Amino acid sequence: MLLNAAHALDHLVLLIFASAVSLIAIDLGVDRWEDLMPYTAGAFLMFGLGSIPAGRLGDLWGRRKSMLLFFFGTAAACFLVSLSQEDWHLAISLTVLGIFASIYHPVGIPMLLRHAVRPGAAIGWNNLAGNLGVALAALITGITVSIAGWRAAFVLPGLLALLLGFTFMRLAPREDVSPAKQKQQKDSAPFVFNGDCKRALIVMTLAACASSILFNFTTNSNTELFKVKLDGLLESPAQIGFVLALLYAGAGVSQVIMGRLTDRFALRPLFLGVVSLQVFFLLLAAFADGWLFYAASLGFMAAIFGAIPFSDVIMVRFIDDRLRSRVAGMRLGISFFVGSAAVLLLGPVVKAIGFQFTLLGLAVIACLTLLVVSQLPAVPRVLNLTAQPNT
């Protein structure tokens, strides 16, 4: 439960800025919100690049200690953002936030999956928790900025991170030895990095890059996108936050469903089906307005969220637990680096071509993902060397 709560917190803190960017721009004297969006690129850049050393920390130093660093570092960074007085202060403090936020995925997810008998279901619920964090970012930020301003929207998650950190320190079992130093179980088969494994990791990484672009473009632009597409239907930040929270919570259920399905059925046809839905609903959203657009956005967000568990399931099927934090760190480092470029380009792209052509461009990326996923090799139904040594 604490690891799932940490996932929600991780996504919540990274999306507060996007949910409050219009008000932050006014407060800091920036003319247009699009001109302020590049200042958060450092957060997403370090969210990706930081995953690589974070993965090494998790395997070599210990996952429990790394998670404590995540909780307390994230709290300190949130407080630092709330104290920003100029745009360059904001850029630096958001980058620091991205550094500490980068720890969770390569450390917390392998920690969660180490003894999971049904890894797909565990990943699905964990990803749902992450998406609830996305939903809460929109909802809590919308309400908080209306009542107490945008700075309070960062202080509250900082306090939550402190509370979770102290609870984790008290309840999480201590590690006698780091995962990388654990001796191989006598009954387990030796880990072989064969050709199918290499091809699966390439597919996993490329698909994760595409997923990161789609996720970051949509979640970071949805507040402003909804103002355009639902013009006249919503009047306040709190209302927009509420409908976005419903959108993310509803779409997040797809991750639980897909996670459970990956435990029962072949990965490749499932993955291809989800990406095909991304293409369809992104095209529909590009030409829709009003509540029809809202229905289309529920479809493409459900498909984007539903594709996320596949990368972690592929890792569980092919990689031994002693290497998972490092492999996850490399994959996340590459994909989140690409995703940070999406955040950097978001404002300029929307300013230049508008939301309709942006959505059409995302549909093209989803089409390219179909080609990548078609190369995924066949895998056994379950391969979790720690939970089932004789598999």
Image (cartoon, rainbow, N blue to C red):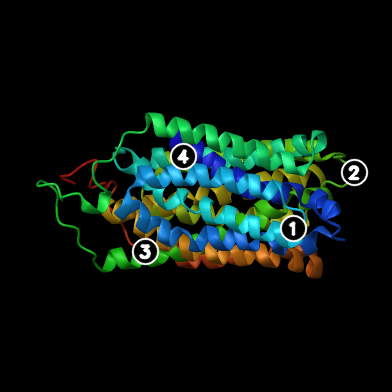
Look at mark 2 in the image and give the residue it sits on: 232
Q: Which mark is residue 126?
A: 4
Cα separation, mark 3 vs mark 2, equals 46 Å
Residue 288, percent across and down? 78, 52
Look at mark 1 in the image and give the residue it sits on: 286
- Residue type for callout 3: Leu
Cα separation, mark 1 vs mark 3, equals 32 Å
Residue in front for this viewpoint, 373 or 7: 7
Marked residue nearer the N-terminal end (3 or 4): 4
Marked residue nearer the N-terminal end (2 or 1): 2
Give the label, 3 or 4, closer to the camera. 4
Residue occupying image coordinates x 51% and y 61%: 48
Residue occupying image coordinates x 79% and y 35%: 148
Look at mark 3 in the image and give the residue it sits on: 201
Residue in front for this viewpoint, 215 or 27: 27
Mark 4 secondary-structure assignment: helix
User: Disc 3 vs disc 2: Cβ atoms closer than 8 Å?
Assistant: no
Badge 3: residue crowd in 10 Å (few <14, some 14–19, many ≥20): many
Cα separation, mark 2 vs mark 1, equals 18 Å
